[in-house]
């Protein structure tokens, strides 16, 4: 018998790369432990990391926070009832991955857990006080030209839309710096045109446009941090400052006093993207906007609208979807038309209205581009016209404001593309006797690791996870017989 | 969160400094709750013998707080507000009056538990001093937890352990058991627990002794003669 570790999956597992949007947890996991160690010197980061942990993990941390010695692992296990052992191990894993706690031996030889010193210290500082104040909190005289929340909201939106408009190649290219363009290029959201070297949007870029604003900002900043080191900015310092912003109060001014030069540069960049408002470059004070505040809760799926509609009358929905798959969009901006064009077939264009139709072909083209059905539906829902919210769904109660037929059909069009499921596996073939084959096959079946088998050709495929076990069994078996 | 700040309680009269420790623990607990999630909110009510008041959030404009140390701004605001408003509350108490029972006691607690049950809100009670039978009943019917803290030194740790997890998480954790809940009612006249008592037919107040006029709603019971003695006989038999 020979086994060939040829995996059944081809290299091109996912022909259309879907845009990766990591959350803070995943982002930090991909960093080195040294980087994490530096990060945990900032109370803000500790606070943010704590909030992102699974519920059980948070419980562990808070109970260990005031314990100064290692706690036996068995004790930690006993805090959770047996039936939820799986979740417990998941929580423990998350804590280890982020080096929030480390293994520490206890006198007597038992393995124990101990919170990382810097994390523990700084979380306590954030919770109970002590330590040095955050860099931006020096006191200020009241601002003569204080800005209110509504102003900040519209400012932030205008700045951010500027970036998005640039991406779809609208005429207005002013107000976007070379730095921002570099980040877009680095992130693969845009690419240099082969002919004239101008930046053009990529498929990933279109997917980016369909994300919610909070997610867009977070993804953008992630790439900013990647490129930060090249510009002699410390990624840790930037991240800490970002989270500092996200824990600030909307509509309140903060001082730039005592901030390092690097951070002042970073602040100017944030100002460009609309995360902070500054009247003048040298104003000495700044206001964080809602974009900055939402970084911390961008992944909190429970908050449906990161930007509440109340503060933003100008960002009303403009799309009407009918049960006959027609889409009417009351819009004049090229950005929105371009976005709609991604997954609809545009029929007519009027000064203030665009009419399109969702067809199998148009949706499939979007799916081929890596856009998911969920993204399309989310986008249509998010930008539904006021009239859609009022209309009745013909007696059918559905959670979505869109016609249920359209939602279902888009999902069906997606699932008809997913006819293959890929599983990695190992092929066993060239058995010398039928008996050998049957024994091994039955064993694999019993273990629940058999993917496929054929008696006539004496070939079987075992999952990657079960390969070691089956191999061991085969060695034992062939020795005895 | 409702904090009973009545200076009449035993643990405070014994050692007034304990109150500061307890208050610090309560504030830290409140902040830990805010730390769990960005959406979590906090309200603290101080319950004194002459009135009850919101300690946090303060009515009107919030304090203008700047960071003084590494503490998260919001947490500093919570701490400052609670301490300031508690001082005001204690100062405003009438000097000549002797501290009586806390306003929280009795009917208000019952009403609170009733509303909580209807709204499916958990009521948790942490007692630092004596056993609170009525509130324990409230915890039981709303599915909350009741804990009598064995020692005041570990108060914060108890709070964080037992009361911080959300209700959905509690099923997964090993928490102290409910124990047996005493469901007996307390009489309105002496606040003693009764198995059998007299109930006003109009307002349903409970009394341990028969009185011809209900002290709660002032209804006059006209029945004289054999009736009042009859339940007594019954009681004797049991």
Image: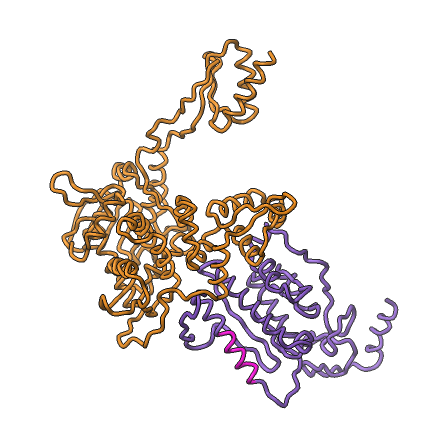
Chain colours: A orange, B purple
Q: Residue A439 versus residue A125: which sits nearer the camera?
A: A125
Q: Is residue B50 above or below residue A364?
A: below
Q: Which quarter of the picture shows residue B144? A: bottom right
* Residue at point 58%, 14% (across, down): A479
Residue that appears at 33% across and 41% down: A372
| Quadrant housing residue B121 | bottom right
- Above or below — where is A453 with respect to B41? above
- Percent from the top left, x then y, of residue B9? 67, 76
Can residue A322 be seen at all in this image of the molecule? Answer: no
The residue furthest bottom is B96
> Where residue A350 sits: x, y (%)?
16, 52
Q: Is residue A254 left or right of residue A166?
A: right
Vertical relation: A413 (above or below) A39? above
**Residue B85 colored magenta?**
yes
Residue found at the far front of this picture: A107
| Quarter of the figure that contains the N terminus of chain B | bottom right
Q: Quadrant of the C terminus of chain B?
A: bottom right
Quadrant position of residue B127: bottom right
Judge from the rendering whether residue B5 lies leftward or rightward of residue A292; answer left or right. Answer: right
The segment highlighted magenta reads B81-92
**Residue at left 76%, top 83%?**
B212
Between B59 and B84, the one lying in front of the other is B84
Q: Inspect the magenta stretch and tell me whether residue A211 lies in it.
A: no
Q: Main secondary structure of the magenta part?
A: helix
- Image spot of residue B82 (x, y percent): 51, 74
Residue at the outermost top position = A433
């Amino acid at each position: 018998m020979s086994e060939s570790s040829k995996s059944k999956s081809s290299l091109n597992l996912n022909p259309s790369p879907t845009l990766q949007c990591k959350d803070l947890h995943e982002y930090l996991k991909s960093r080195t432990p040294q980087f994490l160690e530096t990060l945990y010197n900032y109370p803000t980061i500790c606070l943010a990391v704590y909030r992102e942990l699974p519920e059980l993990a948070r419980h562990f941390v808070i109970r260990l926070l005031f314990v100064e010695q290692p706690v036996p692992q068995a004790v930690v296990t006993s805090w959770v009832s047996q039936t939820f052992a799986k979740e417990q191990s998941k929580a423990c894993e998350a804590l280890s991955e982020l080096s929030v706690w480390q293994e520490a031996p206890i006198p007597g030889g038992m393995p124990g857990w101990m919170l990382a010193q810097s994390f523990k210290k700084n979380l306590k500082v954030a919770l109970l006080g002590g330590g040095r104040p955050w860099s931006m909190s020096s006191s200020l005289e009241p601002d003569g030209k204080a800005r209110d929340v509504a102003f900040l909201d519209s400012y932030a939106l205008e700045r951010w839309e500027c970036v998005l408009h640039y991406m779809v190649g609208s005429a207005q290219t002013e107000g976007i710096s070379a730095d921002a363009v570099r980040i877009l290029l680095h992130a693969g959201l845009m690419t240099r045109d082969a002919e004239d070297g101008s930046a053009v949007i990529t498929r990933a870029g279109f997917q980016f446009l369909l994300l919610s604003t909070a997610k867009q900002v977070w993804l953008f900043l992630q790439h900013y941090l990647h490129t930060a080191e090249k510009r002699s900015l410390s990624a840790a310092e930037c991240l800490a400052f970002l989270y500092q912003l996200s824990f600030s109060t909307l509509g309140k001014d903060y001082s730039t006093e005592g901030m390092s030069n690097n951070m002042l540069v970073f602040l100017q960049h944030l100002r460009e993207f609309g995360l902070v408002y500054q009247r003048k470059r040298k104003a000495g004070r700044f206001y964080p906007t809602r974009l900055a505040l939402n970084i911390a809760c961008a992944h909190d799926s429970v908050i449906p609208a990161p930007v509440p509609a109340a503060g933003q009358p100008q960002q009303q929905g403009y799309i009407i979807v009918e049960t006959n798959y027609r889409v009417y969009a009351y819009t004049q901006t090229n950005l929105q038309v371009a976005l709609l064009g991604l997954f609809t077939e545009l029929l007519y264009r009027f000064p203030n209205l665009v009419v399109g139709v969702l067809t199998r072909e148009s949706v499939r083209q979007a799916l081929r581009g890596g856009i998911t059905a969920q993204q399309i539906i989310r986008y249509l829902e998010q930008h539904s016209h006021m009239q859609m919210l009022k209309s009745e769904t013909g007696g059918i109660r559905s959670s979505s404001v869109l016609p249920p037929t359209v939602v279902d059909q888009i999902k069906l069009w997606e699932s008809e593309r997913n006819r293959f499921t890929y599983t990695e596996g190992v092929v066993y073939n060239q058995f010398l006797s039928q008996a050998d084959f049957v024994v091994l096959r039955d064993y694999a079946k019993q273990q629940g690791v058999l993917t496929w088998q054929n008696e006539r050709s004496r070939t079987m495929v075992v999952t990657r996870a079960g390969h070691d076990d089956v191999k061991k069994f085969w060695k034992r078996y062939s020795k005895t017989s | 969160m409702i904090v009973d700040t009545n200076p009449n309680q035993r643990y405070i009269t014994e050692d007034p400094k304990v109150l500061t420790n307890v208050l610090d623990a309560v504030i830290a607990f409140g902040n830990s709750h805010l730390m769990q999630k960005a959406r979590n909110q906090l309200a603290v009510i101080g319950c004194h013998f002459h009135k009850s008041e919101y300690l946090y959030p303060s009515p009107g404009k919030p304090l203008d707080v700047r960071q003084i140390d590494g503490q998260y701004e919001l947490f500093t605001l919570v701490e400052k507000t609670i301490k300031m408003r508690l001082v005001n509350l204690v100062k405003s108490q009438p000097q000549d009056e002797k501290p009586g029972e806390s306003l929280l006691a009795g009917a208000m607690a019952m009403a609170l538990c009733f509303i909580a049950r209807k709204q499916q809100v958990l009521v948790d009670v942490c007692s630092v001093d004596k056993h609170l039978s009525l509130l324990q009943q409230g915890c039981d019917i709303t599915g909350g937890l009741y804990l009598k803290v064995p020692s005041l030194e570990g108060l914060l740790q108890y709070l964080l352990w037992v009361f911080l997890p959300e209700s959905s998480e509690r099923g997964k954790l090993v928490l102290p058991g409910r124990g047996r809940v005493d469901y007996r009612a307390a009489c309105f006249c002496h606040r003693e627990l009764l198995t059998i008592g007299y109930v006003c037919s109009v307002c349903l107040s409970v009394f341990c002794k028969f009185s011809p006029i209900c002290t709660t709603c002032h209804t006059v019971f006209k029945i004289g003669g054999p009736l009042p003695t009859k339940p007594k006989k019954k009681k004797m038999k049991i």
